[in-house]
Image (tube, rainbow, N blue to C red):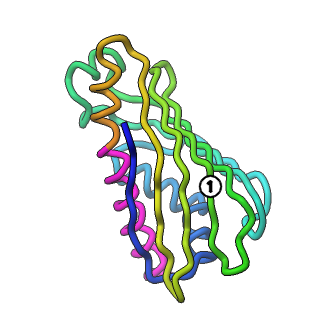
Amino acid sequence: MALSASTTLPYDVAAVIDVFTDKGFLQHMSQQVGGSLESSALDGDTSGAFTLVAVRTMPTARLPEMARKFVGETLTVTQTEHWAAPDADGSREAQVEMTVAGVPLNVAAVQRLIAEGGSTRVDLQGSVTSSIPFLGGKIAGAAEPMIGKALNVQAAEAQRWLESR
């Protein structure tokens, strides 16, 4: 399933990166969806290339019932973001991978933070795949809109987070 989402935040790229990598914000986002942040690790300085790995436990209540039968009531999701150093205008790009423990569901995407004056356009393009026989397409199809919605929730929460600082 193709994945495509875009939104804009009224802050510069550096501020958005600071929020997206803040452990408190990662915990907050996990709680927003009824889950919890199990761990997060930042390898490198966010002023250059770096990698962020976040492991979350997420509820499966929004998945179709047939999928919940296979995965149970919670999922452990590992999100790995490999961020490149900023471009001359401050724009950033990350290779994003999401895996689900015990479930053959994968997300591979490119997230771009595009500098637009004092604002940042957040674009996500990628794919969701599942190799579960017969059900993989349905599971990937159900996951795709949830991931797109998650980007919009993340952006809205990031804006509130920045406004409260």
- Magenta stretch encompasses residue 148: yes
Q: In the current view of this chain or complex, which residue is farthest to the top?
A: 133
Left or right relative to 88: residue 100: left
Q: In the current view of this chain or complex, which residue is farthest to the bottom?
A: 117
Q: Residues within 10 Å of mark 1 (few under 14, many from 20)?
A: many
Q: Quadrant of the N terminus?
A: top left
Q: Dividing the picture into quarters, in which one does residue 46 lie? A: bottom right
Magenta stretch: give its range.
145-165
Left or right relative to 49: residue 39: left
Asked if 41 appears above or below 8 in the picture, the reply is above
Q: Dividing the picture into quarters, in which one does residue 151 lie? A: bottom left
Task: Tell me what residue is drawn at x 56 percent, y 42 percent.
Answer: 79
Q: Amino acid at mark 1?
A: Ala
Residue 153 percent coordinates (x, y): 35, 60
Residue 25 percent coordinates (x, y): 51, 61
Q: Main secondary structure of the magenta part?
A: helix
Asked if 138 appears above or below 121 in the picture, the reply is above
Residue 10 percent coordinates (x, y): 44, 83
Q: In the current view of this chain or complex, which residue is farthest to the front?
A: 2
Asked if 56 appears above or below 86 in the picture, the reply is above
User: Which of the two residues, 9 or 77, is positioned nearer the viewer here?
Assistant: 9
Residue 150 percent coordinates (x, y): 37, 53
Q: How many numbered tags mark residues here?
A: 1
Q: Label 1 belongs to which residue?
A: 94
Task: Tell me what residue is drawn at x 43 percent, y 55 percent.
Answer: 29
- Magenta stretch encompasses residue 82: no
Task: Tell me what residue is drawn at x 53 percent, y 88 percent.
Answer: 117
User: Which of the two residues, 128 or 57, is positioned nearer the viewer here?
Assistant: 128
